Amino acid sequence: MNVESVSASSSILTRLRTETRAQHDAIEAALVELTSDGLDRDAYRRTLERFYGFYRPLEMGLWAVGGWGQRDLDVTQRRKTPLLDADLRTLGLANPEDLPVCTELPPHATVAAAFGCLYVLEGATLGGQVISKLLRKSLGVSIENGGRFFHGYGDRSGPMWQAFRASIMTFADTVAIQDEVVAAAKDTFLKMHCWITPQGDNR
């Protein structure tokens, strides 16, 4: 790898962090109810239903891209749809697979676009650790009774994030690739925000 590639590679995470900040902040604002004292179980379940409707079709598309093993990512360990499915069933929804799913997904057909989507999903998993602790206090929700999704990787969250960081930094070794990754990450935030908010019900 030449000097230019190393420089480009080392800055991808900085670019993602800075260039998607507005979209990231909008998502956090949309999910503020999850951290409020007034949250009830019905509202919590509705939020999980919306996430299920977004994650299920997007993850199916991401894994179909293939070649993740060559990039040192075991995506089978990173799937969140099974966690959402388990939580919803625990919370009383008999058939989560019948829920409506998002049809306006971000681009994810190329490896670069898929990495951009994964940046958002993996970052959300990392941030879910904070929400998981708050849910335990406000609703008594744990991994045994509907809290698997936000618990995510649990004690493995740090190592899983570091593995993703290493993979994306190795992959995004040119400015052109970085541009595609960042664009996809921005669009993932936007499409997720649109889907999880009531006014964005694009079923």
Image (spheres, grey):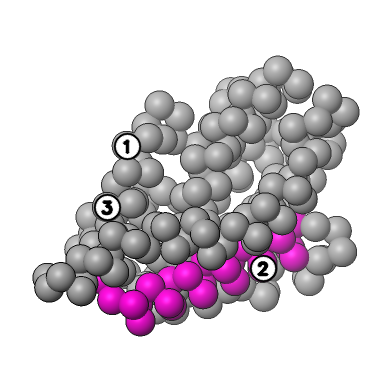
Question: Which residue lies most toward the left here?
Answer: 1
Report helix, strand or loop for mark 2: helix
Q: Residue at x 49, y 56 (%)?
A: 17
Q: Is residue 178 magenta?
A: yes
**Dot 3: few (<14), some (14–19), or many (≥20) neighbours within 10 Å?**
some
Q: What residue is rendered at 38% in x and 73% in y?
A: 178
Q: Quadrant of the N terminus?
A: bottom left
Left or right: 183 as drawn, with respect to 85: left
Question: In the image, which residues are magenta?
Answer: 173-196
Q: Is disc 3 placed on a helix, strand or loop? A: helix
Q: Can you give x and y, in whole percent of width and height, for residue 177 in the image?
A: 35, 77
Mark 2 and mark 3: Cα distance apart in space: 26 Å
Magenta-span inclusion, residue 99: no
Q: Amino acid at mark 1?
A: Pro
From this view, report whether residue 141 is shown above or below residue 102: above
| Image disc number at residue 191 | 2
Q: Circle 1 is placed at which residue position?
A: 159
Can you see residue 177?
yes
Residue 131, by quadrant, is top right
Residues under numbered marks 2 and 3 in contact, where contact means CB atoms less than 8 Å apart = no
Q: Nearer the viewer, mark 2 or mark 3?
A: 3
Give the alpha-carbon distance from disc 3 to disc 1, as whole Å.
Answer: 11 Å
The front one of 157 and 59 is 157
**Residue 168 % position (x, y):** 32, 60
The disc at residue 13 is none
Total numbered labels placed on residues in the image: 3
Q: Residues within 10 Å of mark 2 (few under 14, many from 20)?
A: many
The image's mark for residue 166 is: 3
Of callouts 1 and 2, the N-terminal one: 1
* Residue type marked 3: Ala
Q: State the residue at coordinates (67%, 52%).
A: 25
Between 65 and 134, the residue placed more toward the observer is: 134
